[in-house]
Image: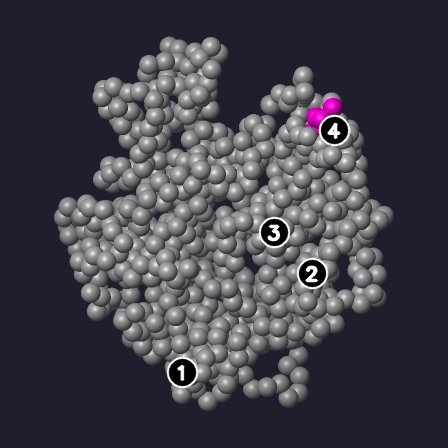
Amino acid sequence: MEPINEIKRDSLLAFLSAGRRADNRGMYDYRKIVMQPGILQNADGSAIASIGKSQVMAGIKFDIAKPFADRPTEGVLSTSADLLPLASHLFETGPPSDESIELARVVDRGIRSANIIDLQSFFIAEDKVLALYIDMFILDHDGNLIDASSLAAMAALLAARMPKIEDGKIIRGEFAGKLPVKEMVTTCTFGKLGDRIFLDPTLDEEKGMDCRLTLATTETHLCAAQKGGWGAFTEKDILELNGISLDKGKELRALLKSD
Amino acid sequence: MEGKIVMPGEMISDKPDRISYAYVANGKTYSTVVGLYHEGKLVPLEGPYEPLPDDYVVGIVTEVKFSGYSVQMNCAYPAFLSSREIRERYVMGDALFAKIAMIDEVRSTELNDAMKLPPGKLVKVSSVKIPRIIGKKNSMIDMIKATTGCDIFAGRNGYVWIAGKGNAPLAEKAVKMIEAQAHTTGLTDRVAAFLKSQPQIIIDQGAGAPQQPQMPPQEEQHERREGGYRSSGPREGGYRSGGSRPHSGGYRGNSNRQ
Amino acid sequence: MMGGNAANKPVLLKDGKRVDGRSVEDVRPLKIVARVLNDADGSAYIEWGKNKILAGVYGPSECIPRHDQSLYRAIVKCRYNMAPFSGAEEHGRSGPNRRSKELSKVIKEAFENVIISENFPKTQIEIYLEVLQSDGGTRCAAVTAAAVALADAGIPMKDLVNAVAVCKIDGQMAVDPGKEEDNFGESDMPIAFSPRTGDVLLFQMDGMLTPEELARGFELAKGASAKIREIQVEAIRKVYDEPREERFLVIEKKD
């Protein structure tokens, strides 16, 4: 099916001007979030996160790798995202699109800035470190893939186990305790149309909106941000949304903890 | 709805019968789809929309051309609305409600009798469920409209447009509920009970609200001419070349194919 | 397929019992759920042994690019893909490799046979198969799930296809090899059937088989195929016997 704009900007504006959203949510309400951590056995960590009809699976794998030349004692953290063609007819097969690259890098930035994984502890021997791969498989697209991916990645990290290493090699199938994760990072993605701002846009809302802002937070700090789209946010917007993200983070962390 | 659920490849008759959505092999008739089989008729439970003349559909304008508009209507084949058929002007993204005037030999659809739809939300359902969503003599759709206060346009193509200031999410839920249970009995009562049990937010119409356009009657004045297709059965051996070999075997409703 | 070190070859068959306790006729535990995705026209999720595979189908829709289209029928496109975290060993690379391209082709050709494509000229039908977790026999599981996804989408087919592999372990033919049997067995033969006719739509093998072993392999595979079809039908019927308005993928946690 050809990609079409299901709700014109006008239709979306009509809803928002009346202070409503098409699904009767409040402006800063999330859709139903369901977490399924630890569902895969071959992966070293895994989770599915769904926000409304968007569904994302994150898988974690450890490998032995060479460290980066400028950081010889540090482990490697690598994040990627696949916008699978079965998730949306808007996604095509082929090399990673700009959208999937942005998605992966935004999720990665939050995790890396807050230093929640101690990459220094991944040093094994000269020229040998542990590499942690986070791969997000987008299974179903109904908007706000960034927040769904962050939740899936975070839940996968929390469910992950350290591999057993012997003589500089990973013994697959055996583990050495849980992956230490310092704290939880959560993201909140907002859409903006005109001067209306709303949290957790659906796909319809994404098609009509002017821009989006993703804020990654720990309990106390902002640790990553990404603005996308051609529209503009004001400074006041951003300060206010930062507050809302810190607040919403509590709700999201509760969901991550509960399993 | 009555009948037995059958699977693709399942035998539905031990004689060679001419049944839509079924094929004949070795003197027996087999289903090609997941469908309900009852008294010689096979009705698919899912499937792509098959446009037929006189169907009313909901479409979205995807391209503004010099002589008219390209319309997206949940169909693999193009649909076109000529400017000569309408008085208003449309822009890309506009939703409309129109009638299929004709389908040509390359399966392009021409629309007429079009009406621009007010701002609203598009809900996509499986097109085979639309008759159930409309109901006998519009009974089901009227019930949803009355309880939710929404304007609802159900296109035979599976696009349902929900507009107006009523409780759109509730209307959408009702539509989705019917879609999931279209094959069951007692559905009308269950939908009525569901609608009654939900809080219905009525938004003030306000003074000077624009007149809602009247929807043309969607009753089926005649039995909808059956779409569907009959396969000529398993292809006779041989390697299929690059598509230049003419195909034999009859298909009702797919005329003029050489 | 075969590649294990002959020196550490374990005993695969003893007193009619295989490494996991199965007999030569038993298929691994198999579960299918249909209609698990919201955007795809049809979808199915299969767990077969430890394999976890998701199938999504679109179509018929406009054929893009235009030059691919056929004037006489829908063209079938198929992509088999493995998640980087799907294997038991190291992290895989994203994107298609030679093996996945080969599998995409042979699976596509199996479905080109049964999909009644003449009804939708100039369109395309897309089948996407994502291996979330692999455990030997992914192509058979993928074919089996794809058929359910196609039925879920309402795409007309001559039959509900499924596939199962046969192996030779310790000189005996056995159905549905597990990981060890895949690695240390003497032959691997995946077969896709149209159960109604017994037509073979996908057929590959490696290893060495006598004519008797080949015949025995088919006998075992056909028996298994009939049982697998029942599970497919059950999954499809469940969509209608237990209608849900919400679609989501649920994976039960196992240790």
Q: Nearer the viewer, residue C217 or C95?
A: C95
Q: Residue at x 45, y 80 (%)?
A: B65
* Corner quadrant of residue B212: bottom right
**Secondary structure type for disc 3:** helix
Discs 2 and 1 share one subunit: no
How far is mark 2 from mark 4, CA to CA? 33 Å
| Label 1: chain letter | B
* Residue denoted by label 4: A122
Can the viewer see residue C53 in this picture? no
| Disc 2 element | strand
Same subunit under labels 1 and 4?
A: no
Q: Chain of mark 3?
A: A
Q: Look at the image and give the residue range highlighted in magenta.
A: A126-130
Mark 3 vs mark 2: which is more N-terminal?
3
Q: Which circle's residue, 2 or 4, is located before the other in the chain? A: 4
Q: Which SS type dominates the magenta stretch?
A: strand
Q: In front here: B68 or C253?
A: B68
**Residue under label 2:** A228
| First of labels 4, 3 by sequence position | 3
- The quadrant holding residue B171 is bottom right
Say which element carries label 1: strand
